[in-house]
Image (tube, rainbow, N blue to C red):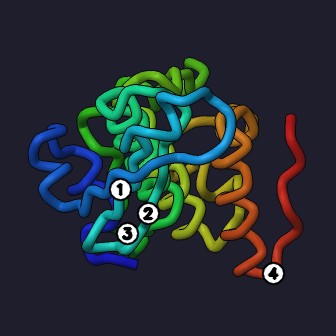
C-alpha cells in the first residue's frame, strides 16, 4: 500500500512515467524466425517505486514492445497498488468521474488510457468497503450490479477483486 496509491503513477504522461522505471531489452527466444532470435526486441519494464515488472516480447519491434509494456505496467500497478484511505477521504478522481454515473453503466474501454485509473478506483473502493461489493458500489455511486459487471468483464480485474475479498475472508465473486 502506498500513501497516494496507484493514482500518481497512472496520471503521469509517458515521458514522466518511463523515468520511474528501469528499462531492459533482451533477446526473446522461441518462435518468430531468425530476426526475433538475433535482436534485442523483447522489453522488461520494472516500476522502481513499486518493484512491479512486466514484459512484452510478442512483436519484432522493440518500440512496439515498449508501448505494450507501458500499458501493461500501468494496469499492473492499478491492480496491485492500493491507496491508503479512510471512509471520509474516498473520492473518484476528476479524470474519470464521467464514467461513474449513477444512472449509466460503468463502461470504459480497456484501450482507453484512463482504464487503469478506473480499475484502481473500483479496487480502492472495494478495499475500503472490506471487500463488500454493495458497500463499494455505494462509495462509487453506482449500483452493485453495474460495479460487479465492470469487475467481471476483465479477468485480471476480477482476480484482483477476488484477492481483496479473500483477504477479508469473503467468497470470490463469480463472473457475470
Q: Which mark is residue 6?
A: none
Circles 2 and 1, Cβ within 8 Å, touching? The answer is yes
Left-right relation of 15 to 104: left
In primary-sequence order, the first of circles 3 and 2 is 2
- What residue is at 40 percent from the left and 55 percent from the top? 44
Q: Is mark 1 on a helix, strand or loop?
A: strand
For residue 45, the mark is 1
Pick the quarter of the image with the C terminus. Answer: top right
Residue count near mark 4 (Cα–Cα under 10 Å), binned few <14, some 14–19, many ≥20: few
Tell me the CA gap for discs 2 and 4.
28 Å
Residue assigned mark 4? 169
Distance Cα–Cα, label 3 vs label 1: 22 Å
For the N terminus, which image quadrant? bottom left
- Closer to the camera, 156 or 89? 156
Characterize the local packing of mark 2: few (<14), some (14-19) or many (20 or more) Cα atoms within 10 angstroms: some
Judging by the rendered image, the residue that carries numbered circle 2 is 53
Q: Can residue 58 be seen at all in this image of the molecule?
A: yes
Residue 114 figure quarter: top left
**Mark 3, residue position:** 83
Amino acid at each position: 500500500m502506498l500513501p497516494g496509491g496507484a493514482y500518481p503513477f497512472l496520471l503521469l504522461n509517458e515521458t514522466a512515467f518511463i523515468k520511474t522505471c528501469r528499462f531492459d531489452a533482451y533477446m526473446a527466444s522461441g518462435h518468430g524466425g531468425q530476426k526475433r532470435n538475433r535482436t534485442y526486441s523483447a522489453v522488461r519494464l520494472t516500476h522502481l517505486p513499486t518493484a512491479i515488472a512486466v514484459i512484452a516480447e510478442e512483436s519484432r519491434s522493440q518500440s512496439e514492445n515498449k508501448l505494450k509494456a507501458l500499458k501493461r505496467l500501468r494496469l499492473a500497478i492499478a491492480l496491485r497498488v492500493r491507496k491508503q484511505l479512510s471512509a471520509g477521504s474516498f473520492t473518484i478522481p476528476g479524470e474519470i468521474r464521467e464514467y461513474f454515473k449513477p444512472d449509466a453503466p460503468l463502461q470504459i474501454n480497456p484501450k482507453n488510457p484512463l482504464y487503469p485509473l478506473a480499475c484502481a478506483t473500483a479496487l480502492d473502493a472495494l478495499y475500503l468497503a472490506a471487500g463488500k461489493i454493495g458497500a463499494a458500489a455505494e462509495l462509487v455511486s453506482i449500483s452493485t450490479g453495474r460495479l460487479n459487471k465492470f469487475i467481471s468483464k476483465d479477468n485480471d480485474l476480477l482476480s484482483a477483486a477476488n484477492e481483496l475479498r479473500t483477504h477479508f475472508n469473503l467468497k470470490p465473486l463469480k463472473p457475470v
